[in-house]
C-alpha cells in the first residue's frame, strides 16, 4: 500500500472542506498528532503566501484553518462560485448587521423591509447573529460563528468594519447605501 504524504492529506482536506477545518477533528480523523497538524497547516499557509496567488490559508480564532480566495479575487470569481444556501437578500441583511453592529433591530427593518424579520430569525437560528433585548427592540451583533464562517481573524466590530472598508476600496458607506 502506498503511504500518502501527511502534508498532502491536510492540504486536500483544506481544499475539499469549503470552510474552516478544526485541528482537533482533523487529528481525530487522520491519526496525525495535533502538534504536527499545526506545523503542517502553518507550512501550507506560508507556501500559499509565498506564491502570492489568489488562494490563502488562514488560522481562525477557534484553532481552525480555512482555505479561501484573497479578497482582491473574490469579486471576479463570484460569477463562477456555485450559489450558496443563503439568498442574496439574507446576505444583504447579514452584511448590514455586520457593518453597523451593534444595531437595533428596528433600524435593520427600516433599511431592509419587513422581510428582514425572517432573515433575522434565520440568522439567529444559524447562530450567525446575537439578538439581545433593549427596551422595545433588540440589539443585533455578529457571533464567533459568523467570523468563523467568513474566515475573519477577529470578532471585534471595528475590525469587521475595517474589513468592509477595505473591500469597498477604502470608501466609507453611508447608512442608506448598505
Image (cartoon, rainbow, N blue to C red):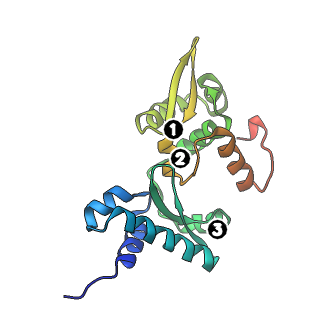
Earlier in the chain: of badge 3 and badge 2, it is 3
Q: Nearer the viewer, mark 3 or mark 2?
A: 2
Residues tagged 1 and 2 counted as in contact (Cβ below 8 A): yes
Q: Residue at x 48, y 61 (%)?
A: 66
Residue 130 in view = yes
Q: Quadrant of the C terminus?
A: top right
Badge 2 element:
helix
Q: Position of residue 80 (x, y in %)?
A: 54, 69
For label 3, the SS is helix
Q: Residues within 10 Å of mark 1 (few under 14, many from 20)?
A: some
- Name which of mark 1 and mark 3 comes first in the sequence: 3
Q: Can you identify the residue that label 1 sits on?
A: 143
* 82 relative position to 79: left or right: left
Indicate the position of residue 90 as horizontal and vertical percent values: 53, 42
What residue is rendered at 43% in x and 62% in y? 18
Q: Which residue is mark 2?
A: 147
Q: Kindly identify which residue carries mark 3.
A: 73
Residue 107 drawn above or below residue 99: above
Q: Are the residues tagged 3 and 2 within 8 Å (C-beta)?
A: no
| Residue 43 horizontal/vertical position (percent) | 50, 73
Q: Nearer the viewer, residue 114 or 173?
A: 173
From where the camera sits, is residue 53 visible?
no
* Relative side of 14 to 49, left or right: left
Quadrant in which residue 11 is drawn? bottom left
Amino acid at each position: 500500500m502506498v503511504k500518502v504524504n501527511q502534508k498532502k492529506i491536510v492540504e486536500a482536506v483544506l481544499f475539499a472542506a469549503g470552510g474552516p477545518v478544526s485541528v482537533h477533528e482533523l487529528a481525530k480523523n487522520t491519526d496525525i498528532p495535533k502538534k504536527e497538524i499545526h506545523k503542517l497547516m502553518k507550512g501550507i499557509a506560508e507556501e500559499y503566501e509565498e506564491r502570492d496567488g489568489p488562494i490563502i490559508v488562514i488560522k481562525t480564532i477557534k484553532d481552525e484553518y480555512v482555505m479561501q480566495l484573497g479578497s482582491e479575487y473574490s469579486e471576479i470569481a463570484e460569477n463562477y462560485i456555485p450559489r450558496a444556501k443563503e439568498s442574496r437578500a439574507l446576505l444583504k441583511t447579514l452584511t448590514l448587521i455586520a457593518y453597523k453592529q451593534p444595531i437595533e433591530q428596528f433600524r435593520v427593518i427600516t433599511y431592509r423591509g419587513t422581510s428582514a424579520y425572517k432573515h433575522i430569525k434565520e440568522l439567529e437560528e444559524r447562530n450567525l447573529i446575537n439578538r439581545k433585548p433593549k427596551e422595545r427592540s433588540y440589539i443585533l451583533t455578529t457571533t464567533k460563528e459568523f467570523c468563523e464562517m467568513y474566515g475573519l481573524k477577529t470578532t471585534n466590530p471595528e475590525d469587521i468594519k475595517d474589513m468592509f472598508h477595505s473591500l469597498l476600496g477604502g470608501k466609507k458607506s453611508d447608512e442608506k447605501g448598505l
